[in-house]
Amino acid sequence: MKGITSNMAGTVFKVLVQPGQSVAEGDDVVILESMKMEVPVSAEESGTVKRVAVTEGDFVNEGDLLVEWE
Amino acid sequence: MLQKILIANRGEIARRIIRTCKRMGIRTVAVYSEADETALHVQDADEAVAIGPSQVQKSYLNVDAIMEAAKATGADAIHPGYGFLSENSDFARRCEEEGITFIGPRPEAITQMGSKIAARGIAKAAGVPIVPGTEEAVASAEEAVQMAHAIGYPVLLKASAGGGGIGMVVANTDEDIRQTFENAQKRVASYFGDGTLYLEKYFLHPRHIEIQVVADTHGQAVHLGERECSIQRRHQKVVEESPSPVVSPELRDKMGAAAMALAKRLKYTGVGTVEFILTGEHEFYFLEMNTRLQVEHPVTEEVFGIDLVEWQIRIANGEKMDSTLLSVTPSRHAIECRLYAEDPVRMLPSPGTMTRFDAPVMKGLRLEMGFREGDKITPFYDPMIGKIITAGSTREEARKRMVEALSMFSVEGIKTNLPLLTNILENEHFVRGETHTGFIDEYMK
């Protein structure tokens, strides 16, 4: 299983993708928010979204799975 | 005389205000969110009132809860600190209506400086040079492109209601504007409830210089020189100092006079800061006025040997500024570093529990810390843990003291920007005073 993980602890501010969607390398998939700062998390390679593991408002730690990849 | 002040803030600034109140014999009320129940500012105050859940909208921005706390404790004044409600004119007006002294300027002055577009107009009318840009809000990407052609690239898209760099976008081409305009508008609307954007000329590598002004309710005003705050990341300040290594006495007089002209035009009262950018050619342009105490106010206090919070309170109390303040002269150089809970390389927030927090004690060092060992730095608020301020008879002495102080900190459990601060302070360009707003991007990456 491949996935995109969180790069910091914070709240999921926005989920920008849905299952089945194909995403290119560098596209933002989730925007995290922490300490008054929004940080986009982008795809490191192109692929298709299998599952979104978080919903907006969720709290995540650094390293938590955000999006599962195919 | 004010008897009891409620501090509508948290962290280091709440503690710093409480300290001055104690020295003046004024009782203090802290307010706190769920996340801050055991925070130091709560323990420092004479009384403390819970005002809601951790999210800022439900606690530190919750006007009803804060007014209720003030009434329940019999506070006769509210000090808003910086951030949160400090530049909210509705809040200042509400205090007025409820017979509680708001420690800050009149609500009208806050409103006038709160809208960047209105502020530009007033500054212009006061004869203060302004950055070339739009006089009106920009409604669409195409309109922005038209205006960018008139001003000349690069341009900066800014939030009218914003602050702290949120929503700012630098555009070098028409394409840049078309790609970013809508997003910037949305982001700004979600943050400030007002998506109004405007456009101004962007200067590459200017310095950020600001003038501290103090004005009383008897028509007296004074400026306390400049602070240079050029070292920034994401448009937020990291290192500040006073005096600036490049501001000559003549330039200081000119910038001071401009700041005072604006304060006079606003019939400003209390402490306030007029921010300018200074170009390589030593031309200065008005950026904005912060109608509150600044985060970096301690550098001015250290240079002049005064207490700005004390003067805020005395002015709110209707007192006249005395000759000691009106004729005070700078005697030292001071530097402030903001200690952030963030990854020093990626500069991303790093919330968590500080399992170790050792801070040094030494000559010429002042610490303003909001947290202690064992405290949790939560993701709900600003990442600033506190401020480190050093002073010396020369810039080099203050700088060396800062390098030494930084080396003596020991923080574990979270990442901090301490390594970045040390790198900045030891960088040859910083040593030579060659600072500009692109400093971190240029030399620290």
Image: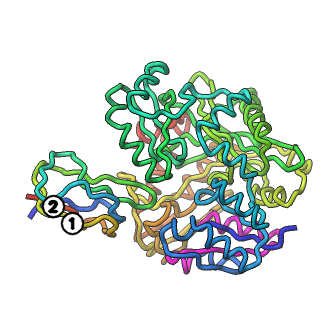
The answer to whether residue A69 shows anywhere in this view is yes
Query: From what the image shows, is residue B226 above or below residue B53?
Result: above
User: What label does residue A65 carry, if any?
Assistant: 1
Query: From what the image shows, is residue B91 above or below residue B249?
Result: below
In the image, the segment drawn in magenta is: B11-39
Residue B217: percent from the left, percent from the top? Answer: 86, 50
Chosen colour scheme: rainbow
Residue A48: percent from the left, percent from the top? Answer: 10, 54
Q: Quadrant of residue A30?
A: bottom left
Image-based side of B345 in relation to A30, left or right: right
Q: Is residue B396 magenta?
A: no
Query: Which residue shows up at 73% across the image and 63% down it?
Result: B95
Q: Residues within 10 Å of mark 1 (few under 14, many from 20)?
A: some
Query: Which residue shows up at 25% across the image and 65% down it?
Result: A63
Image-based side of B132 in relation to A48, left or right: right
User: What label does residue A3 carry, if any?
Assistant: 2
Q: Residues within 10 Å of mark 2 (few under 14, many from 20)?
A: some
Chain to which the residue tagged by mark 2 belongs = A
Task: Measure how far apart labels 2 and 1 are at the Cα level.
Answer: 7 Å
Q: Amino acid at mark 2?
A: Gly
Q: Amino acid at mark 1?
A: Leu
Image-based side of B391 in relation to B436, left or right: right
Query: Which residue shows up at 12% across the image and 48% down it?
Result: A46
Image-based side of B62 in relation to B344, left or right: right
Residue B8: percent from the left, percent from the top? Answer: 65, 67
